[in-house]
Amino acid sequence: MIFLLLFGASVVLLFGSSLLFGPPYLPTLNKQVKESIKMLNLKPDQVLFELGSGDGRLLVAAAENGVKCIGAEINPVLVLYSKIRCRKYKGLVTVLWKNYWKLSLSSADAIYVFGLGRVMAKLDKKIVQEITRPVTVVSFAFKFPNRKPDRVVDGLMIYKFTPKASR
């Protein structure tokens, strides 16, 4: 009984603590994963960052198209699951146990995020300050408050970002 209580408390802590830094784990639906990959239209030599990569399903879909991917996830259980899920794409997928606020986005060609409304303005600033070239960003469900999406499909919004120095 004590084991079950400790296990339950651990799960609540691992999954609930992510709320301090961003959204809880909610997997992107397969329909949106496929549409995101299509919207991003990445070439094999480009790099996709997934901020809050969860179970790795978007990383796998991108890797299946030959795209190099970097996923940042704060939940160690999901990091382990993603690493196992992505192991056959070893040369293409990197899953980091990392808070994406501490991740440099300088090598990104594209970014996918399923954020919360409360973090989107801060994320906008981070992207603009850190990118080194124009970047395509797909956000599921939540808009960047001071930007108009270029296109919206099934709850996915696509944005074009340019580096701060390029403005």
Image (tube, helix red, strand yellow):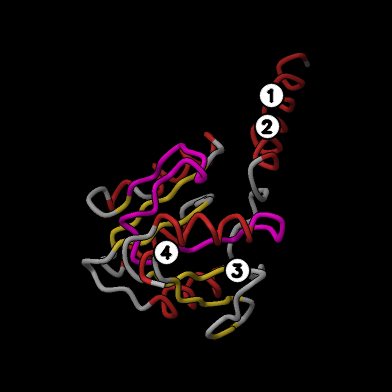
Relative height, residue 156 to residue 104 (above, below): below
Judging from the image, what secondary structure is the residue with disc 4 in? Answer: helix
CA distance separating discs 3 and 4: 24 Å
Q: Earlier in the sequence, mark 1 or mark 4?
A: 1
In 3D space, how far apart are the residues under numbered discs 3 and 2 (Cα atoms)? 25 Å
Query: Is residue 93 on the magenta stretch?
Result: no
Q: Of the numbered discs in the image, which one, if any, rests on residue 11?
A: 2
Residue matched to label 3: 140
Q: Which residues are magenta?
A: 94-119
Q: Residue at x 59, y 67 (%)?
A: 29
Per the model, the C-alpha gap separating discs 1 and 3 is: 31 Å
On the image, numbered disc 4 is attached to which residue? 164
**Identity, as a three-letter code, of the amino acid under mark 3:** Phe
Q: Earlier in the sequence, mark 1 or mark 3?
A: 1
Q: Amino acid at mark 2?
A: Val
Instruction: Place residue 130 in its image quadrant.
Output: bottom left
